[in-house]
Amino acid sequence: MVLSKLTSAQPNNSFNEDLKKWDNYCLADPMFNKSDRIDIVLGADILTEILQPGLRKWGKILGQETSLGWILSGVINTNNTVKTIISAVTSNIERFWEIEEVCEASEINETDKECENWFKSTTTLNKENRFIVKLPFKKENELGDSRKMAMARLLCLEKRFKRNSKLKKEYIKFMKEYMEMGHMQKVS
């Protein structure tokens, strides 16, 4: 799923905050009290890589040192309303994860079982850590009346090869490589 928008501007509204206590700290977001778009969303795997040992707390605001600067989180009270300084998780991000929850399949049919068994028995990992997956094909060949159309396309392709010898050489090279990789078999 691709979301056009992960979250709204944070904080929801700008607020006044005494920044003097943070003067000696390089903040990751020096304008944390101004409502603006989110610049970056980091996963927990990245967060643990950038965390530094520094930790400061003033009232209900917690400052955590990172390699990007100090990040702030917590709750402040302004004009009898509660404002939240958000550094890692927002309600919209939580909703994103709820959307992404995987539902258990209630019933697996025979075709799904065959596909899963095919995947398990034919999928391998190569030296470059890439998965090699063989595609399953139905046992019954349902070609229908495709011979006439296939012959017409073959004749058209042969005409192109007569006009362009470089294209013919590259096509032959590709088809040989395709056969050597085991993607098709030579029919006698």
Image (cartoon, helix red, strand yellow):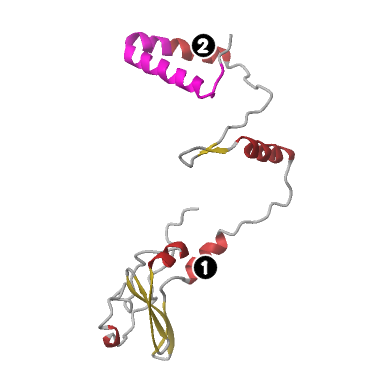
Q: Position of residue 89 (x, y in %)?
A: 46, 71
Q: Is residue 116 left or right of residue 37?
A: right
Query: Could you classify mark 2 by the number of other residues whose Cα lies within 10 Å: few (under 14), some (14-19), or many (20 or more)?
Result: few
The C terminus: image quadrant = top right
Q: Nearer the viewer, residue 111 or 23?
A: 23
Residue occupying image coordinates x 42% and y 20%: 174
Q: Which residue is mark 2?
A: 151
- The three-letter code of the residue at mark 2 reads Met
Relative vertical location of residue 119 with respect to residue 38 in this rendering, above or below: above
Q: Nearer the viewer, residue 17 or 50?
A: 50
Relative vertical location of residue 20 with respect to residue 140 in this rendering, above or below: below
Q: Nearer the viewer, residue 140 or 179?
A: 179
Q: CA distance from mark 1 to mark 2?
A: 56 Å
Magenta stretch prevailing secondary structure: helix
- The three-letter code of the residue at mark 1 reads Glu
Q: Give the structural element (helix, strand or loop) at label 1.
A: helix
Q: Which mark is residue 41?
A: none
Q: Which residue is mark 1?
A: 94
Q: Is residue 164 left or right of residue 7?
A: left
Is residue 177 covered in magenta? yes
Residue occupying image coordinates x 48% and y 66%: 93
Q: Give the structural element (helix, strand or loop) at label 2.
A: helix
Residue occupying image coordinates x 48% and y 22%: 178
- Counting residues from the N terminus, which is met first, the one under dot 1 or under dot 2? 1
Q: Position of residue 9 (x, y in %)?
A: 38, 70
Res. 57 image quadrant = bottom left
**Magenta part of the protein: which range?**
157-185
Count all numbered tags in the image, as a single digit. Answer: 2
Q: Position of residue 130 (x, y in %)?
A: 49, 40
Is residue 182 covered in magenta? yes
Q: Nearer the viewer, mark 1 or mark 2?
A: 1
Q: Position of residue 28 (x, y in %)?
A: 31, 72
